[in-house]
Amino acid sequence: MESLLDYGYLGLFIGSFLAATVFPFSSDVLLVGMLALGGEPVTTVAVATLGNWLGGLTSYWVGWL
C-alpha cells in the first residue's frame, strides 16, 4: 500500500477503488497516510470518497450482471 502513496492522489484513488471492490484491505490506511504526508484535507477526502463510491458502484454492477 505504501507504493500507492508514491503516486499521490492517483494512488489514493486507485487504492480506494480497489478496496471497495475485491481486494481485502482498508482504504482508511491510505487516507491517513496521505494526510500524514501533507495532502490537502479536502482534496484527499474527496478523492478517497470518489474512489470508494465508484468501487462500490462497480461491485454493485458486477453483482447485478
Image: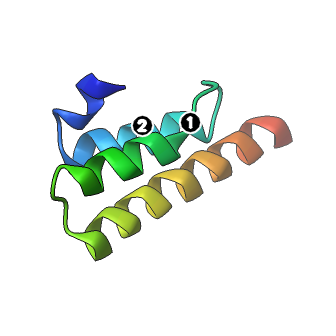
Name the amino acid, label 1.
Answer: Ala
CB contact under 8 Å: marks 1 and 2: yes
**Please, which residue is most extreme toward the bottom here?**
42
Q: In the image shown, does 61 or 33 lie closer to the viewer? A: 33
> Where is mark 1, residue-wise?
19
Q: Secondary structure at mark 2?
A: helix
The quadrant in which the N terminus is found is: top left
Instruction: Measure how far apart labels 1 and 2 are at the Cα level.
Output: 6 Å
Residue shown at the point (39%, 51%) measured from the top left: 31
Q: In the image shown, does 15 or 58 lie closer to the viewer? A: 15
Residue shown at the point (64%, 25%) measured from the top left: 24
Query: Quadrant of the rendered structure where residue 6 is?
Result: top left
Residue shown at the point (36%, 61%) measured from the top left: 47
**Please, which residue is most extreme toward the right here?**
64
The local crowd at label 1, few if under 14, some if 14 to 19, many if 20 or more residues have their Cα within 10 Å, is some
> Where is mark 2, residue-wise?
15
Q: Which mark is residue 64?
A: none
Question: How many discs appear?
Answer: 2
